[in-house]
Each structure stands twice: as C-alpha cells, then as structure tokens.
Image: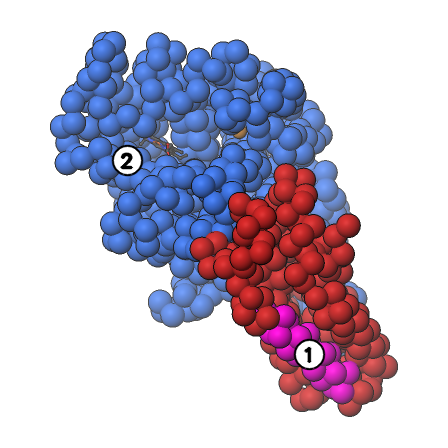
Amino acid sequence: MTTEAPAPATAELRGEPAPSYLQEPRGLWSWLTTLDHKRIGILYLISVTAALFVGGLFAMLIRLELISPELSFFSSTLAYNQAFTLHGAIMVFMFVIPGIPAALGNFVLPLMLGAQDVALPRLNLASWYFWLAGSALMIGAILAGGIDTGWTFYIPYSSTYSREGDAVLLALGGVFILGFSSIFTGLNFVVTMHKLRCRGMGWFRMPLFLWAIYATALLQIVATPVLGITLALAMVERAFGVGIFRPELGGDPVLFQHFFWFYSHPAVYIMILPAMGVISELIAVHSHKKIFGYRAIAFSSLAIALISFLVWGHHMFTSGQSQVAGAVFSFLTFLVAIPTAIKAVNWVATLYKGQIALRTPMLYALGFLFVFIVGGLTGIFLATVSINLHLHDTYFVVAHFHYVMVGGTVMAFLGGLHHWWPKMFGRMYNERAAKLGWLLVVGGFIWTFLPQFIMGSRGMPRRYATYNMEGLEVHQPLHLMSSLGAWVIGAGMVWTLCYLVYSIFKGRRAEVNPWRAVSLEWDVPSPPATHNFPIDPHVDFGPYDFERIDEATGLIRPGPESQRLLAAAAVKTLPPGAEEENSG
Amino acid sequence: MSAPVAQTTGTAAVAEAAAEHHQGHHPALQHHFENLEQQADAATLAMWLFLVTEILLFGGLFVGFAIYQTWYPELWHAAHKKLDPVLGTVNTVVLLVSSFTVAYAIRMAQLGKQRATSWLLGATIALAGVFLVVKYFEYSHKIHEGLLPGAAFSHAELAAQFSNAHVFFSFYFLMTGLHGLHVLAGMIVLGGLLWKNARGAYSPEYFTPLEMGGLYWHLVDIIWIFLFPLFYLIK
Ligand code: HEM
Ligand SMILES: [Cu+2]
C-alpha cells in the first residue's frame, strides 16, 4: 500500500496512448455530467468563446454606429446604450473573468500539479452550470428588452431610470449567479493547490501560471461576495425601493459605487493576473530559458492581489469623494505599478539571450508585452487626480481598459490557447495560418484603440451615441479609423476560430512535448488519458529546468529517484495477479 | 528488460493496476485523493474558504448598517426601541444551545455513538425551528405595526419624527432575513446529515460531512451573535 510507487509518467509509461479523455467515456451525456477537470475546461472553453463572439458582435454594432456623428445605424440612442451595456457586461462577466482560469486553468492546473483532478470535482461542474444559468439570465435580459445601465449598473440608472424593469432584474440576477460560478472556481483552485500537489511539488516548483491563478483565486473568494451582496441590494432596491441606494428614499447612490468598485477593481486583476501567469509560461518555454526572477514574479502576483483591494476609489475621483481620499487612492494606485513593473522587467530579462522561437504563442506574448505596457502606463496617467478630472469618462478610459483587457487578457488567452492547444486536442494548428491570425488581431487591435487614446485626450466623451455637437465632429476621422480596425480584429477572430477548429479534424498529430517544456502537463500523452497519471507522479525538477529535456526524444528525463520508482512500478504492473494489494 | 513496461501496454496496464489499488480503500474515498485524511483536509479548507465568502457577503450589509447608523443616529436609536429585546435574547440562547448540540453530535460520531448523534442532530434542527418560529412572531408584529421597508412603511409615530424611518427597517429585514435564509439552509443541511447518519454513513474513521455541517452551523450562530446587539441593544 505504501509502495504504490510514485513515478513520473515518463516515456516508458507513456507508451501507446490509452483512450484519451476526449474519447472515453462517450456520448453527450457523459460530457454534461463529467467530473473530469479536462472536460470541464473544454466545456468552459466552448462557452466563453461563444460569449466572446456574442460580445464581439455587439462591439461591431457599436463601431458601425460611431462611423458617423449622427444617429445612423441604431434606431435610437436607447438602442445604442443597450448595445454598449450588453457588450461590456457580456465581455466582462461571461468572457474575461472566467476565460483564462476556468477554461485554460481548469485544463492544466491539476496536470501541472501532478494531481488526478481538482479537489472538488462536483463543485467544478456546478461552477460551469452556474455560468450557464447566469448567462441564460443575461440572454433573458436581452430578450426582455435589453438594459441600458452600463455594465457598472450604477444607481439611479439601474434602480430608477432604465426603462425595462424586468430586464434589469434579470441582468442583475445573472451577474449575481455568474459571481458564484467564479467563487466556486477560485475556491476549488486554492484547495487543490494546497492539498493536491504531488510528491516533490513544493510551492516553488509550481509553474508561475499557478502562482498567478492562486492570487486570482484569492481575489475571487474575497472580492466576489461583496459584488454579490451589492447586486442583491440593487435588485431589492429596484423591486421594493428600500432606500439604501436611492437618494429620494434616504439612500446613497455613491455607496453603490463604493461597493461596486470594491469588487470591480480587484476584478480587473481577476482578469489580468491569470493573463500574466500565461505570459510567464509562454516567455520561458518559447525562449527555452529558465525564467528570470521566479520568486519575484510569484510574489508580485500576491502583492498585486493585496494592493488591488486598496485602490477602488480611483474610479470615483469625480464622484465627490474628499480630496484626502482622492490623494490616498491616487498614491495607492501608483503602488500597483511596482509589482507590475517587476513582472515586466523579469519577462524581458528572461528573453535576453534566450533561444527565442517566434512561434504563435511567443508572438502573442510579445504582443502582450508591448500592448499591455501601454495599457498599464496609461493607468498611471488616469490615477493622477488632476489628469483624471480631464480624462474621466472620455475615450481615453475606453482605450485604457481595452489595452488592458483585450491587449492584455485576450492576447494572453489566445497565446495560452495556442500553447496548450496541442495538449488539449492532440493536434497541431497550421503555424502560418496562426501567424496571419496573430497579425490581424494585434494589428487590428492597435489600429482600433490607439486612435481612441488621441480622441479621449482631446475630449471625446464615452457612451455617446452621437457626436454631432459643437466641437466633437472633429473626431470623425479617428472614429472611422477605429471602426475599420474593429473589422480587422473581427476578421482575425473568425479566422482564428476557423483554423483552430479545422486542426481538430485535419491537423498534424501533436507530439507529447512539442515545445520542449518541463512542466508536468507536457509529460502525459497529447491529448491526456481520462485518468491523468497512471501512477501518482513524483517530481525532482523545477518547471523551467530545461536541461532536463532529453534532446533525442524531446521528453523530460526521469531523475535517478524517478527511474528507481519507475522500475518498481513496472515490475508491479507486469504480473497483475501477483500483487499483494487486495489481500486485506 | 531495462524498460520493463512495454510501450504498447504502458499506460493502460498501469492505469488498471492503479484502479485496483484504489478499490481497497474506504468507500467514501474519492479517486483523486490518496487517503481519507487528505480528503478531510481538503474539505475543511474548502469549508473555511466558503465561510469567508459568507462573512464577506454579510460584510457588505454590516458596512452599510454602520454607515447609516452614523448618519442617522437618532433614527437608529428611536427605531430600535420597536424591536423586542426579550424575543431577541430568547433566540440568542436558542442558537447558542443549538451550536452546542451540533458540536456534541460530532463528538458522539467520533465515538461511534450513532444513535446519540442522530438525537443531537435532531435537537439542533428542532432548535433552529424554534428560532424561526420566534422570528415569525417578531416579523408579524412588525408587519402589523407597519414597521416595514420602503413604501410599505406606515408607522405614524416614527414617520412624524423622521423623514426616512423606513431605512432602519430595510436593514432589519434584509439582514435578519438573509440570516433567516441561512438558518433554513442549515436545517436542510442538518436534515440531510441526520438522514445519512441514520443510515450508518458515518463512523469514527469518517465523519467529515458532519464536521462541515457543524462549521456551517456555527457560522450561522456567529452571525446572529453580531446581529443581536447591533439591532436590539443600540445605546
Ligand atoms: C472586438 C474588439 C472590441 C471593440 C471594437 C470594442 C469596442 C467598444 C466600444 C466602441 C465601446 C463603447 C465605448 C463607450 O461609448 O463608452 C466599448 C465599451 C466597453 N468594452 Fe469593448 N470592444 C472590444 C472588445 C472588448 C473586450 C474583449 C472587452 C472585455 C475585456 C471589452 C470591454 C468593454 C467594456 C468593459 C466597455 C465599457 C462598457 C460600458 O461603458 O458599460 N471590449 N467597447
Ligand atoms: Cu480600478
């Protein structure tokens, strides 16, 4: 019993693939009731991709409208307001927040830890069903007439003004449930990382992606319940008028903003920290060099998570908070730049003298570096109170958060997807097609959003359906440019979807370890078997010890200890009847 | 035979061996855990994290309560006199005793006394029921007097003194209501545990679900311990 021979699932054990998790068990029902983290990851991947495309559709409509200063595409400004609200809410709550952790994270986290599954598989599946239920309510809100509150649900839009009463309640309820889905994922990951690391897997042997996921999960656990109660109160306020947020009933609308941003600022780190984790993997693996400053990157994730709770007031500089509060929030916001810069510097230092392979994942990582740094630095502009007063609620803000959320998170999502795609589906995508997709997405992105910085700094307000008033029409050329760029991104996204799906059926079969990486998910078949590891693994190497790669086979070489255990496992396996296992 | 596991049999054969290996274990052990201890540790950590989320959920309400109390101190003082401190005290005692009975139930399970465990779980559920009955009488009294949130508020005396007297009762009903829902959920959870215990699911080796249910119930108790003085004992 104690001799259950921990060994890595290295070359000898890998052998001919057992039926993969994609094949066994069969049938739609087996997928809908699966407790396998890999399958739940795939279910999430399909769902969040659908959300990305629905949200993207709304974005295209918004950009169509803004080509001309007059109301041209939408029938009313109300319809425009509904389009940007749904765009924002769908993208934020249904795509970006669950995107990397629940889709990619679910798939790779237990594999990276050498675990057979997450700690609470049933909660994991429940999380996906909560996502579905929350999303269904959001769709219900669209069908019930749409909402025009903005994704932030500010009072009094959400309590009094938004014209479609039931739709607002549906959307608030939907986001409330999506919040629980997010909590379940985070909680599960924390427990898994604490309790299910395999033998030899110390905290500092975890790939940096997992440190980022850990910090994210803490935020999901601590911040999301506050969003939950805030939205619940907003619902009660709307339905019964209880006077907690509505000023005419004795309440305080700014209290809603405080509550909302107490969650939603940490939430922007729920969106970006996993992306940063992905980038750490991509940069190290595709430059085949030990990551520079492992601990600095690991701890900076925790530092960011901590500081992110202390800065929510930077969304409210113009809401009449005291000047002292403004100054304090401004200063604390500057502090976030430090751990963020630590990461950026370490990534660049990793690239230095690495064997950089300009494959698609690496290209996305480089795109991230350039674009995200602009997004982050403009955040510092916005955190400066005097400048913020000028830029608040302009296109500068829109450009800023798209640089971070799209240029950061979406790019890391795509990079990570290409990186783990061979593992997930056992197929290689066409590299040249992928490079074209990258060019469209990154090029289109800059084309779309760079003009928005310029417009914003010159005073173009956000959330305006028309800009035919005095002085604003001058922005028309830049708006046109932005709208054209949006089509390029859209084309890049559709193209990416096409060649990726194509590769599942027609792609070249993937090797076990196509990128010569050293974390454990690259030590199991592509795609993995239903049961992650035939025998609980044992690691005696770090996630970036590239010298452990056997140049001949491209696989991770087992260390002396692992070899001994491997042999023991093999001896035990050969005569199946001759075991003392079930004697008791 | 230096690479004894042939390439062709490798993963599958070893997986079979691994599967057999797991069968020798306690029926409650899930496949991805090595032993019951690891499984219990994971459940406990998960439960504590869940309790953190619960506290933060109530935290929003507590913060709101504190803010409005500092804004409307006179209202808070006048309105709290409409609550019945005797009933509040009774309910506090009831919940404290129920926390004891659930803790004792777990102790009995550890000692393998299945029947005693069942009785104590039953007692806990009964006490939770008493709590809700008392709450029912308190609520109907408030409703009768028109001490309600929003437009339903119709208490002439308070309305004459304060412009937004209903806000206090918004907090009162929201906070005690959310807590009441948690009591109800606790009764369901404890009921499930009682049912499983009666069918012999727990033993001195395995009683993790009982411990988790107990933790949850203590949380429900503790939240009330904060609600009670905040609402009933305002100076
Ligand atoms: C296809 C690329 C995209 C385009 C062309 C696009 C375009 C736009 C436009 C035109 C607005 C309205 C600005 C305003 O008037 O206030 C907007 C708002 C917004 N977008 Fe995007 N977007 C894209 C992708 C995304 C993604 C991936 C996210 C999520 C990370 C996102 C998050 C948001 C948010 C949060 C808002 C603010 C909504 C609000 O004000 O309530 N966008 N976007
Ligand atoms: Cu913020």
| Colour pattern | by chain
Is residue B122 within the magenta segment? yes
**Residue at left offset 60%, top offset 28%:** A311
Locate residue A315, reporting x and y percent.
51, 27
Query: Magenta span: helix, strand or loop, mainly?
Result: helix
Instruction: Inspect the image, locate mark 2, and give the three-letter code of the amino acid beneath it.
Output: Asn
How busy is the neighbourhood of tag 1: few (under 14 within 10 Å), some, or many (20 plus)? some
Say whether residue A524 is visible. no
* Residue B130, label in figure: 1
Q: Mark 1 or 2, which is nearer the eye? A: 1
Point out the stretch of residues depicted in magenta.
Answer: B118-139
At 45% from the left and 51% from the top, the residue drawn is A241
The hue used for chain B is: red
Give residue B20's position: percent from left, percent from top.
64, 75
Q: Chain of mark 2?
A: A
Q: Nearer the viewer, residue A158 or A416?
A: A158
Instruction: Count all numbered tags in the image, as a single digit.
Output: 2
